[in-house]
Image (spheres, coloured by chain):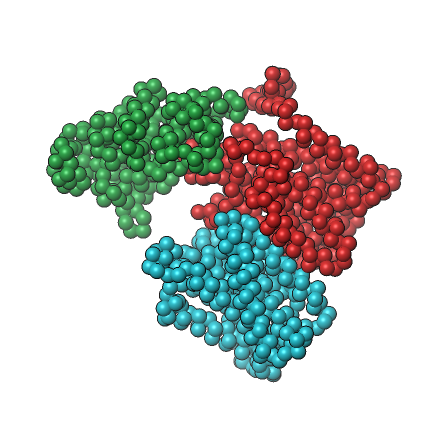
Amino acid sequence: MVDFELRRDRIVARWGDQKYEWVIEPRYWRNPAIGVALLALLPLFIYSYPNVLTMMTTANLYAAVAIPLGLQMLGTARVNFGPQLYLGIGGYTAALLNLHFGFGPALTLAATILVCAGIALLLSPTTWIAKGLYFSLITLILPLTFLDVTFIWGDIFRGEVGLAGMSPLLTLGKVTWNYLAYFYLSLLLMLSYLFISDKIVRSRFGVSLAAINENEDVARMMGVDVDRYKIFYYVFPSVLTGIVGWFIVHTFRTFAGVTYLPLDFMVKILIIVIIGGRAYVYGAVPGAYLISIVEDSLRGLGPINYVLFPLVLILAIIFLPRGEGLWGLYHKRHHRDYFPTLRVRRD
Amino acid sequence: MLEITNVTKTFGGLAAVNQVSFSVNEGEVVGLIGPNGAGKTTLLNLICGIYKPDSGTIQFDSADITGQPPNRVCKLGLSRTYQIPQPFGAMTALTGVLVSVLNGKKRPNMSLSDAVPEASYYLEFVGLFSKRDTLARDLTLYELRMLELARALATTPKLLLLDEAMAGLNFTEASRALEMISNAREQFGITILWIEHVMKIIMSAAKRIVVLQYGRKIAEGPPQEIATDPKIIEAYLGARYAQNK
Amino acid sequence: MNETVQSILIFTFIWGSIYLLISLGFSLICGVLRIFHLGYGVTFVLAAYGVWAFMENAGLGLIPSILLMLLVQIGFSIFVFYKGVFQRYLDREEILLTVSLLIFMFMAQLANYLYPVTDGVSIPTTLSDGMVTIGKVKIANQMVLAAFIGILVTAVYVIWFLKTRTGLIIRAISQNLPAATLMGASVNRMYYLAMILSVIPPTVCMLVIAPFWGIDPFMGSPLLMTAMLIAILGGLGNLKGSIVASYLIGFIHSSVSFLYVSRFMGLAALIVTLIVMIYRRGGLFVGETIW
């Protein structure tokens, strides 16, 4: 069915008429492999501290939301100020179907994908209709309106309190084992998103995406089907974010719109993309871990953490190196690598 | 090859292009001249599909491309350069041409590494291979124009629309560019529709010239006729050209 | 006319006029500085809690508190926002927007931490107690006065923009910055002026609606949302558009409240905005210029 061919530096997969290439770059595997091994092995030493595990799981989930966001901003050439909309949609779909209809996690996953894809398709025309600043503004307002909706129909959505008691993804005997398993699952989720995004960005589609981000009209003139790309790169990352919502519902087993839909969550994700560094794909991981660690450490200080958290973020933005962010501290960008500029205003 | 029939485009009451008709046959070099504001670039944009004409039809290779989106038009075999170069600023020259190679026509199984040799070929053709890793925003004007040409050629067009390819180039650069364009025409067998202001070049390069003024076509014919036509001299070339002749 | 229709009309007038104040400052910054000021909610928080802080902690009277608070507002908008954020991140707009938002969140949380709602924060700016009956509708005097103050302030601003020389300069800057600079406008000074002017309407708004709206640290958010919707609907940065859109949104809010359920106000306003944007991209009055 699928033919694999191993060449000197790549693996070529053929399926029917299609050909896919995967360039093997052993030079570049060493450090990511070390990073992944670190993330994978660390919990085995600290599993007796469930807070740390939860913090790392949350960090993985933040990164899992930030990575599709980076892909989306590149592909639609617009800044999306409301990625958490699909998190909310996905989460509520999974939670409601689970609680009221008894769907198991697998079925809710399918339902989440369908619902998120459907709504994203419905909203995708905004990527080309809304010019200039307007797309960003609409994306800013939509999650807040969805939050409003959850309060309005509070009997279904349970506005403030949120839904609870959804079935877990898996139950292993002890609670610590559950936490550990959830961490590995979230790590797997995040790494697969990272892998997918990386493959897309460094392939022929990535070149077209960069062209769209630079100059849409010229890209169109060079034959890039900009509208189709925009639809795909709006819907696909939205579905990925929805899946993160599904994951949250079935691991944390509570889901309240008020945690994920308001501006504070959005700001966290945006900061991850900004601080993590302009190499949007990888930078999300250190950015997410930084935010998660800061959030967790501040939480210990009591109610003043709500005041300090935005302050810390402001300082982080001001003092971290311009553009390159955290990832730039580790990996100096080669001058010929594409460095996307985010432009909020597009004509 | 290209047939434009009674194309009209108005912007808020002003007719930028008014009932223009002409055709371009295969293998020709047709020049499009006219004073500033005559509607030449608008006509080009109409052909490319960036604007939709209010009335009239545009036929390319007996297919109707009136109002088709630019990417469709490109895949049919039309390509253009821009009056003010519009490179993909943050991308290297090579990557910019890669975009055209990968999207210029339907290439279902071309991966990035497969496209690089082809993009390099076009860069080498225009003489930019040594600058393939330079970011487009760091190139000089001449190199930018060459990059535009390479990018347009990489989409394997049948008809190439050039928009003031010589503007801003000095004499040496202009002759090199002209050489490049004629090489392209010979080697790839493309037809050229060329908007130009530098009269010396267009008069020698083009077989046929179409003259626009205020959105209307006021003359069409071989360069010698155009150069001596009193209507055109009056509208555009003025006494100065008559002196230079 | 039956009571519902009267209520809708009257409350359209009242809410519309109050929303005028909210959106005036926002549109001003949008139209002149061309910056979508996500931190605009700070003005509301500072207005309410500034006065409260000066009165409670410094023991000052109402008028001195208001004046000091205005000074703080102006200082904040110029030094923190204009110099600290706008000038530094003008070329990286996503950072500009995020930092403005963060500053707003910081101030709101600070207000919540220092003066939680349980403290019973209130400002004694009631101008007139009692109710008035118009037709079949009973409304608080304060609301009516708030509406008229809204209209008055807006009228002053519009006249100032249209009739004075500085207003003309600001309009010129908003329409065509390079040309205005060539004509000798000192842009920086005008930007400072625009920032200062933008702070006044929301402060006035906060002061007059405090008696019946209730003060809480997070009131900036829904007010910012309304201001944004009005700005988007009316055309970003366009004063004419803001005026029309304020009453439009006021109408939507009041008709939804009286004809249906008030919970749906925000949602209805958003849907109408989205629909308008589909048919008329750029809002009702296209062109990001102040008039």
Q: Determine whether, in the image, residue A129 is placed left or right of residue C41.
A: left
x 49%, y 23%: residue: B115
Colour representing chain C:
cyan
Report the chain shown in red.
A
Quarter of the N terminus of chain B within the rendering: top left
Quarter of the C terminus of chain B within the rendering: top left
Foreground of the two, C140 or C122: C122
Colour representing chain B:
green
x 36%, y 57%: residue: C181
x 40%, y 37%: residue: B86
Instruction: Measuring from the top left, give residue B180's x and y in whole percent.
Output: 32, 24
On the image, which quarter does residue B185 sit in?
top left
Foreground of the two, B124 or B51: B124
x 28%, y 49%: residue: B14
Q: Determine whether, in the image, residue B71 is placed left or right of residue B4.
A: right
Look at the image and tell me whether residue B177 can be seen.
yes
Look at the image and tell me whether residue B68 can be seen.
no
Instruction: Measuring from the top left, give residue A59's x and y in whole percent.
Output: 71, 43
